[in-house]
Amino acid sequence: MKIGVVGLGYWGPNLVRNFLGHKLVEKVIACDLNEDRLTQIKVKFHGIETLNDYQKLLESDVDAVAIATSVNTHYDLAKQALEAGKHIWVEKPFTSSKAQAEELIRIAESKKLNIFVDHTFLYTGAVRKIKELIDDGELGDIIYFDSVRINLGLFQHDVNVVWDLAPHDLSIMKYVLNGKEAVAVSANGVSSYNCLENIAQMSVHFKESSCFAHFHVNWTSPVKIRRIMIAGKKKMLVFDDLVYSEKIKIYDSGVEFKSPESIHNALVQYRTGDMYSPQISHNEALSSAAKEFIDSILEKRKPLTDGKNGLEVVEILEASEKSIKQRGIPVYLNNHTV
Amino acid sequence: MKIGVVGLGYWGPNLVRNFLGHKLVEKVIACDLNEDRLTQIKVKFHGIETLNDYQKLLESDVDAVAIATSVNTHYDLAKQALEAGKHIWVEKPFTSSKAQAEELIRIAESKKLNIFVDHTFLYTGAVRKIKELIDDGELGDIIYFDSVRINLGLFQHDVNVVWDLAPHDLSIMKYVLNGKEAVAVSANGVSSYNCLENIAQMSVHFKESSCFAHFHVNWTSPVKIRRIMIAGKKKMLVFDDLVYSEKIKIYDSGVEFKSPESIHNALVQYRTGDMYSPQISHNEALSSAAKEFIDSILEKRKPLTDGKNGLEVVEILEASEKSIKQRGIPVYLNNHTV
Amino acid sequence: MKIGVVGLGYWGPNLVRNFLGHKLVEKVIACDLNEDRLTQIKVKFHGIETLNDYQKLLESDVDAVAIATSVNTHYDLAKQALEAGKHIWVEKPFTSSKAQAEELIRIAESKKLNIFVDHTFLYTGAVRKIKELIDDGELGDIIYFDSVRINLGLFQHDVNVVWDLAPHDLSIMKYVLNGKEAVAVSANGVSSYNCLENIAQMSVHFKESSCFAHFHVNWTSPVKIRRIMIAGKKKMLVFDDLVYSEKIKIYDSGVEFKSPESIHNALVQYRTGDMYSPQISHNEALSSAAKEFIDSILEKRKPLTDGKNGLEVVEILEASEKSIKQRGIPVYLNNHTV
Amino acid sequence: MKIGVVGLGYWGPNLVRNFLGHKLVEKVIACDLNEDRLTQIKVKFHGIETLNDYQKLLESDVDAVAIATSVNTHYDLAKQALEAGKHIWVEKPFTSSKAQAEELIRIAESKKLNIFVDHTFLYTGAVRKIKELIDDGELGDIIYFDSVRINLGLFQHDVNVVWDLAPHDLSIMKYVLNGKEAVAVSANGVSSYNCLENIAQMSVHFKESSCFAHFHVNWTSPVKIRRIMIAGKKKMLVFDDLVYSEKIKIYDSGVEFKSPESIHNALVQYRTGDMYSPQISHNEALSSAAKEFIDSILEKRKPLTDGKNGLEVVEILEASEKSIKQRGIPVYLNNHTV
């Protein structure tokens, strides 16, 4: 397997390192327009081949191209790669619009090529454990998914905070709640500095009206929080990604109704029970992602985070942006209506 | 000063205790329909006068009536008290609708009586300190107010989570951001158990478009959080009401732009500086509230938390409820339009 | 049952309240030399009988006397009460010396009277749960008990920090490790202000040389910590008394040796496994303590926290004080020698 | 400057990396008996020179030798290096005994060579800030230093937990309290598994009797804590090395006496005031240490962490070990007596 990596900014070098570390990868070609970055990557990965021309990369013998450039270039670079017969790995978010994502999926299918969208979180031990717990019915029927990803972070100049941070949490939501169909998004946000939105609050409504999801993303929070709460009718789970141990806590606490009419007649009863925190694997997620990418190509199957997965996330991002511009007006997804 | 307290459920006895503890209060009459509660209050406050008939309370010589009954009864009881010439203290939320609040204010004004709405938080040392810091310009121009008040709490059977929990945070917001005019609300929520909404996410938009507020209230969270973040252009503040010391932290961290065009050309620069936590007073807020109520009557002036204050909070609650029913559609406040 | 309470400072009124709340207590007499305190207690507990003369209390018809005065008066007051035929409840620490404790036990036994020492912590849900877990073998053989009880607290003028704070933790240790025999104490401390010691570090050695206990007590710590760690060969437990939920956490983490010789040849292997936090009861401990006191008298049996229990704690306190004066020299307990 | 690094276990490769990163270092030779480690280091630092024979390293043209082998080999390797005319860098702890340390210092002085002991913590932004605050009198006269460094860690097979973990905290204490003279050590510990001590509690007494230090080191704690508290008569400081931001907190809380006699007559008064957390530098400490080592050689002066500094730490370690074997008996330092 030979792989080209285009875009050697913040994330690209991590891709180079992980592909180089995979036993079936015989060659990695690093590509960027910026000569300084090419020089740096050569120092870091002694003897790596580099190119400053994307066309030459497409003409080379690489089997796949990993695209780690800014979002607005994903579609063009990905389309050219697919047309050149290369499998593609695309950083999150997949594309800038649902239409772009759909077109790339069509091209890939017609050419029997793989699209891998780098929703890295789905390859972490923590998210794997959460998926397993939900699938095993440990939490019972899910009633809400609540995510907070806030920080004093760097503003991106090409995308707002929704496109920058929410793909992580949306991809986790789609993965762990894969039986629930999202039907509408209502989002609110603000641009505090006359530039792109730096804070957003996004609500997702489901076909099943008892389920609800919410996402808070913020580049201007004095405290850093990365926490997802998922409540089921039986148990509730909290995933705190900023602690090293006890990342996941499961609370045996839930609401109980003594009789059908009790809801309207009296205060609901709460159980408060034990809490436990399962051990989770600390393997590097990106290495598992690289393995899945390569395995899926060799096994001629779709990867876990395929184009459709990328598209579903982009659809919600696009709807959120539309809703924010109209102060929370609900935007319906995928042919759903009021 | 003689005061009647009607409604001896959870909060009423605290009112009795605080009024009894005020040096100018010579008599407190406790009133409830439930004889058991009257018996209990007599045991607890030896020798207190009780009544099981609200009309008799209104006919008595009390100067003021404190109403601590369920929300849907506030308007009727308050109206009768005002018409009987009594000053009123009303538990939060003031009324069930903006129209009710407006009518009570009109009656009180015509009769030169005081309305006090029990937004207790405004009498805490912490909120006083926050107000002082903002008024002194310590934080700079405010860009957002973000509140989270979630818990594994008891469902109320008469009001949803918005009417139950949000009055606290809305009253704090109105108080500390009193120069900013709210123009629209977009809210989303869910009723996970076929009863009233147990989770809500509320966004408030301001006339000043760079400012934004958000409120998360939830009765079904496995973890308890009571945290308000307020970011200004100079500094940011976090108020965590669940810790005993260091309730307020002020971060000397903010966004800085090197030149006007830098927003569009480059990543924003962050300062990370010192943090400090001011000492705050731990006096009982309800005792300060009782003092303000009595002082305002004696000094023939409006109290800090007057009817208008109560009305402003009710207006947002009402708008939120309307918006939730339409999945986040923006509801405009107070004659504002798109 | 009629009970007298002598000493109405900080703790005495809590005893009055709890005894009054017990269904078998028909009368409580409150006794103090200070007339102001007698006036206050009458206001708080309407109609309670008071006395300003301890002799009169002893001559009254009370069955038992609860002593909540300063430590140096415990022995005299307790002795007089026993000699007057009253059962006694004594606040912690039991007495000022081992010799005093032994004499009181002798008198009580000869007169068939009960001694109850108020080691309140043994009546909390948390300590009960810890005892249960250890007795059930959940932790395996215990290798250490480590306690930290530090605070920015008030200096006591009659006793140092060891006598003030350590009785809590020593009584817990004696209770939960009741199969392990303490043989020696080595303690170090300091008096930072030319008064009594305000910091102390106490090590307790056991007959079983693989077991060890340590206690850190401090009145001058900027942060408040109340944490006990207990490690067994199978599991480890952390009890944090300052959090409301998750007070106890049990870690399935322990040391494992692959073969007998591995200890000397290689690094020890660690397991890191799940953590869980059991639900514990939040009943008021003092109320359970009052119940045990009264039950033990009526059932003519010794209470859980009897004189012997009090004596064992006093013996370690006395040894610690002796050791501190000699900079940690080991002081042997109860006829043990080097 | 040419530097040899001997010992390529856990820490040695970090030394290689930091020396290679220093602009005045023209060559680094890596030396180990183990051929696998030599192969690995060549992969990691492409083209680095290696040797499997320490004698050949001493015969080479290196100016200095950094010794990162196990503690019991430090003295022999250091002595040979000094006798071969090389400056030395020695990992902590400096040597296995005070006598060894004294001899190495004598040799280095006679040959005008530098000894650098790698007490890395003294080169961190946090410890530098603490030193600065104490030297500026911010805390007032220091009354205690309390360190906790506990973890579920790997057992070392050649040294006990005191020699493994305490050098960090002892070197910090010597640095920040450099005006206070330690006179005696009392230590207690346990070997829970029939191997070397895995828990130790060490008290250090000072000439100034109002000052006191204590160290808790533990390889078998279910929770990881790395916290130092330093209390002065004016303010108190907490250094928590496990948090990223707010590592240092300074509390404006202290004890106050109203009059000289108040200590004996009444409860001490406490002030509780503001807390603040200064910003600290996050530079890599090891890089600053490497710079100090090289600068001190070039400037022909002693480094901050010189042989004497290493010796002072070793002296306390040796005394602690002696005290532990006698259950806390005080061991006097440096010609001090009772």
Image (cartoon, coloured by chain):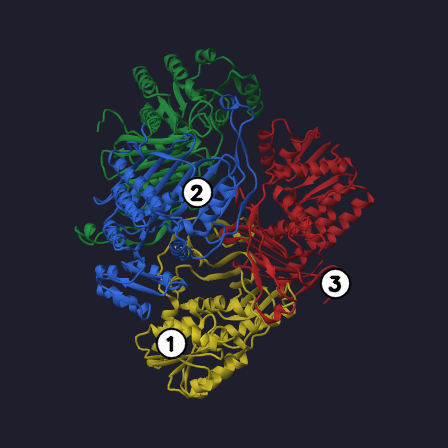
Chain colours: A green, B blue, C yellow, D red
Disc ID at residue A226: none
Rendered location of residue B18, percent (x, y): 38, 61
Residue lying farthest to the right in this orientation:
D110
Question: Is C251 left or right of A300, judged from the image as shown?
Answer: right
Label 3 environment density (alpha carbons within 10 Å; few <14, some 14–19, many ≥20): few
Within the image, what quadrant is residue D40 found in? top right
Which amino acid does the dot numbered 2 rest on?
Answer: Val
Callout 1 secondary element: helix
Judging by the rendered image, the residue that carries numbered circle 1 is C293
Callout 2 secondary element: helix
Proximity of marks 2 and 3: CB atoms separated by less than 8 Å: no
Judging by the rendered image, the residue that carries numbered circle 2 is B176
Q: CA distance from mark 2 to mark 1?
A: 53 Å
Which amino acid does the dot numbered 3 rest on?
Answer: His
Residues indicated by labels 2 and 1 sit on the same polypeptide chain:
no
- Is any part of residue B305 visible from this angle? yes
Rendered location of residue A233, percent (x, y): 26, 46
Which residue occupies the foreground of this view, C215 or C330? C215
Instruction: Classify A90 as above or below B116.
Output: above
Chain hosting mark 1: C
Which amino acid does the dot numbered 1 rest on?
Answer: Phe
Chain hosting mark 3: D
Label 1 environment density (alpha carbons within 10 Å; few <14, some 14–19, many ≥20): many
- Is any part of residue D33 visible from this angle? no
Residues indicated by labels 2 and 3 sit on the same polypeptide chain:
no
Rendered residue at 30%/15% (across/down): A110
